[in-house]
Image: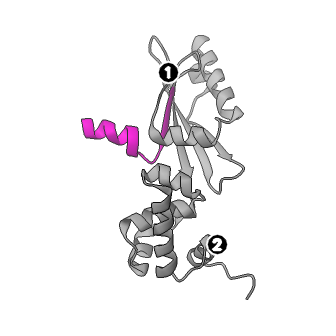
Amino acid sequence: MNEMIDFVLHKCPIGLIILDKKMDIVFKNKKADIFLKRFELPDDVINIIRRIFNAIDDKRLDELFPGEIYVFKKFEGSPSNWRFRFYIYEKDDPLIYILIIEETISNKLDMNDIRKQYRLTRRETDVLRRVLDGLKNIEIAEELEITEQTVKDHLSNIYIKMNSENRLTLLRKLLGTPNMNS
């Protein structure tokens, strides 16, 4: 059970935020914390949370929200699309669970094939995945709990193994886009 709790808290690739009726965060896992350091919850999400709690108070939740509740969002400075999925816990003190799902470029690629093809280590693959998702070195270091210098060292190895000069040439190679200067 402790391993499962540790996974949800620290390793789960999906962010989880739990809000109470006062709109206070009563729980967030590591992925949600990283998200909240980079972005604020969008106004659309805040408005839906308020509407859900009002619907609970008015006993009209099923009428006003008959199906699944999602918000899709693109943030400036992020290459990813973000999906927010709402779950409602309707007991004496209602709570709203928000799953934050990042739809990334690396999710569209077979990272295992890339790792094998270029003989990348598991850690180099972890770094490459985050580079593809648009993270900065410091953000990669924070997510992987390593130093920024270690990220740079892994990137140097990746550039050599993949015969690339920089992040842009890595992206072009993996996404199959031609070099504009050719």
Residue drawn at (43%, 67%) of the image: 125
Of residues 169 and 138, the one drawn nearer to the viewer in this rendering: 138
Q: Which residue is mark 1?
A: 95
The span shown in magenta is 1-18
Could one spot residue 107 in this view of the protein?
no
Of residues 165 and 5, the one drawn nearer to the viewer in this rendering: 165
* N-terminal label among 1 and 2: 1
Residue drawn at (45%, 36%) of the image: 29
Residue 168, label in figure: 2
* In the depicted structure, whether residue 7 falls above or below residue 154: above
Q: Mark 1: which amino acid?
A: Leu
Residue density around tag 1, few if under 14, some if 14–19, many if 20 or more, within 10 Å = many
Q: Quadrant of the C terminus?
A: bottom right
> In what element is the residue under mark 1?
strand
Could one spot residue 147 in this view of the protein?
yes
> How far across and down, in percent of the image, does residue 72 sit?
64, 44
> How far across and down, in percent of the image, does residue 177 sit?
66, 78
> How far across and down, in percent of the image, does residue 117 sit?
42, 80
